[in-house]
Image (cartoon, rainbow, N blue to C red):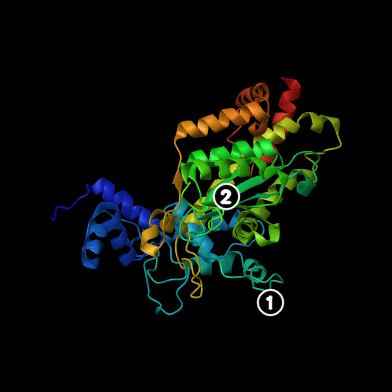
Amino acid sequence: MVTIDPPDNILKESLTTYAKRGLNRQQKIQRLKEDHGLAISVAMLGKIERRLDIPSVRRSAHAVEVIRQAITDEVSKDLGQRNGPNYVQSKMRLTKDIFAPWYNNSAPRKQHKPTQLPLNSDIVRRVMHEEFPEGFERRFPGKVKPTIPRGTLTALGPFHEVSADGHEKIDAKALQMGDVGIPIYGYKDKWTSTGLFVTAIPNCRLAGAIGHLHLDFLEKIGGFPLQLTVDGGSETGWIYVFQTALREAYAPNIDPNVYLPFVTVKSVHNTVIEGFWRWLRDKTGISLKDYLVQGKKERWFIPVVELHRKVRNLFNWMFPPLVQRELDDFCHWWNHHRIRPQPEKEMPSGHVPIDVLEHPTLYGGINCLIPVPHDVLQELRAFLTEEVGPREIFMTWVPEEFATKAEEVHEALGLPPITLENAWGIFQRLSEGFETM
């Protein structure tokens, strides 16, 4: 057996990551050379993958019945039937380690044992046609063209320009369930198309809340981007203060007239993040809203009734964590799915966002992230706290006493873990439990 570096456990972890990103063999070889200094041939890559049992479409460890059930389970979660075979296939690969081809209409049909997965099959598409045929009609592309002219987007590399914006499709105004709602705020990188930071927040229109959230973002990425692009709302005031101050302190040699530190645009022109919100709405957001308003439709949550006003905290204790879980799941899928090729695009296309973020030089990019010491960000946090108040008053959904009580009632009633599917049933049980305990 040929001895190679790095050790098998590290090599297996990297190769599994590459497989989940859907990289081809040449791309895997490039990453192995850059990440581990390992230069190998395509033939050697195949031997290593077989020896380490790296999953792939052609090396599926799952019976066709298991794959069929996984497809059915995944599509059943999409109440709006807006997600196609490619999305379902990539979600199964990322979340369940199930590698199944979604489409191949050129390969000849072959006979296989009932318990094996056909190597060249359109199993994902076929199962979706059999079990959820109406979804294909709903997803049929229309002919409506955008009315706003779009120009060519350009950037030097990751963190050259990051767009930030709020998303209010499931806030209180959208849900119309009294004063309960779950606004969202997010950051997306322009050059790589990576969703950098997306979170549910009690109020995305307060400057103090967005100020603290922005510091959370800077702590996560370990610095700040060359340019921030936002809508022109008053909630971005502290983002402007921090961005311009950090540029002056940590990038004084970069001409702010050539490379702007901060740009405000109309929402319809903030296309980098607005396009991201459209994908979130189509892939997850519509189903999320359907789950949330189900309580109103079934009259399990009646905003005009005094009892339900009192248990507003119960909604805020249960549903924001579920929404955050879906947001994290969507971002994980988005960052690991392959962007469609656009030959005329001046930035990367036909790529996996997270892979470009981690390997910008392979795509001709420059990492523009400007590092900032953590203690400096802590000083900014202390300054912001003095000005507007501590982070907790903006980011906490329910009082700590209520959260503790809700956990106690949930445990005392012996209720299962909360999911979107069972949330309203548990909501009813907990509402009754609060009245009797």
Q: Which amino acid does label 2 sit on?
A: Tyr
Q: Position of residue 356 (x, y in %)?
A: 42, 58
When the figure is inspected, residue 238 is found, relative to residue 88, above or below; the finding is: above
Q: Position of residue 308 (x, y in %)?
A: 80, 33
Q: What residue type is labelled 1?
A: Lys
How many dots with numbers? Answer: 2
Spatial separation of the CA atoms under disc 1 and disc 2? 30 Å
Q: Name the residue under label 2.
A: 187
Secondary structure at badge 1 equals loop
Q: Where is residue 117 in the image (x, y as percent from the top left)?
A: 39, 64
Q: Position of residue 241 (x, y in %)?
A: 61, 41
Secondary structure at badge 2 equals strand
As drawn, is 98 to the left or to the right of 325? Answer: left
Q: Which of marks 1 and 2 is nearer the N terminus?
A: 1
When the figure is inspected, residue 11 is found, relative to residue 133, above or below; the finding is: above
Q: Which residue is drawn at 36% across and 57% down?
A: 18
When the figure is inspected, residue 313 is found, relative to residue 178, above or below; the finding is: above
- Which class describes the residues within 10 Å of circle 2: few (<14), some (14-19), or many (20+)? many
- Which class describes the residues within 10 Å of circle 1: few (<14), some (14-19), or many (20+)? few
| Quarter of the figure with residue 79 | bottom right
Q: Quick check: can you spot residue 390? A: no
As drawn, is 44 to the left or to the right of 104? Answer: left
Q: Quick check: can you spot residue 140? A: yes
Nearest to the observer: residue 284 or residue 204: 204
As drawn, is 52 to the left or to the right of 303? Answer: left
Q: Which residue is drawn at 27% across and 51% down?
A: 11
Which label is found at residue 143? 1
Q: Quadrant location of the N terminus?
A: bottom left
Q: Quadrant location of the C terminus?
A: top right
Residue contact between numbered discs 1 and 2, judged by CB atoms under 8 Å: no
Q: Which residue is drawn at 73% across and 34% down?
A: 428
| Quarter of the figure with residue 131 | bottom right
